[in-house]
Amino acid sequence: MKIKILTLFPNMFNGFLSESIIKRAIDNNLIEVEVIDYRKYSQEKHNHVDDTPYGGGAGMVIKCDVIDRAIEDNKTNKSFICLMTPQGEQFTQQMAIDLSKKDELILICGHYEGFDERVRDYVDKEISIGDYVLTGGEIPAMAISDSIIRLIDDVISEESPMDDSYINGLLEYPQYTRPYVYKGKAVPDVLISGNHKNIREYRLKESLRKTYLRRPDLLEKKELTKEEEKLLKEIKEEL
């Protein structure tokens, strides 16, 4: 898979691409990431990429012709083009899974007051990472790339993503490691019992508990199994 990121600030991605799992994925040729400064697609004397908005108003707007040239020069027949914008569709784990199956992504990072509206004609999807506004699309592009890259085969251990929050419609169960007791709080005994059936049930119940307490909206969307219904009933009785 290849990810191309169009940005005005390519140096922001230096640390992101040179550390931890992302770096290993690149070094092992599991993923290719190219960061492209779309300022070079400006045709103005000082490489300006923005201008004042028609009709007046605060801030500067990224020009559509600059983005169009950047896209045309970098897209292929396999490209799926995404615009980073707070007006876009909310990014989810399922969207990450869907995007991880694409051969090539182009992520477009905005800045200043946003894009000329006509830029939207050139993209396949608009994505938001939350109901808030950032100074630019670079952080969303990093978050989305990270979420996608970890799903690529062999980037992390095969079973790890299957236990993630949201994969099965629930938040992930609590995790513990040594020391067994810390400041008077011990690891739940079931986790050191060696009884895999009980451990599985404990984790499912705690996953349901955390979801019920923190994100009950997820349970409203999920079709519960009979076991999950039973455990959720126990949780409600315990509270």
Image (spheres, rainbow, N blue to C red):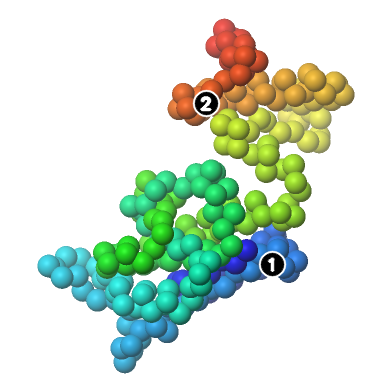
Q: Residue at x 32, y 64 (%)?
A: 121
Q: Quadrant of the N terminus?
A: bottom right
Please tell me whether mark 2 sits on a helix, a strand or a loop: loop
Q: Quadrant of residue 117?
A: bottom left
Which residue extends farthest right? 194
Q: Which residue is mark 1?
A: 26
Q: Which mark is residue 37?
A: none
Which residue extends farthest top? 237
Q: Which residue is mark 2?
A: 222
**Position of residue 149 in the picture relative to residue 154 (left or right):** left
Residue 10 in sight here: no
Q: Position of residue 36 (x, y in %)?
A: 50, 76
Residue 51 vertical position relative to residue 217 in the rendered view, above or below = below
Q: Quadrant of residue 225?
A: top right
Instruction: Give 186 or 74, whichever is nearer the viewer.
Output: 74
Instruction: Give 108 or 211, whichever is nearer the viewer.
Output: 108
Circle 1: residue type: Ile
Mark 2, Cα crowd under 10 Å, few <14 / some 14-19 / many 20+, is few
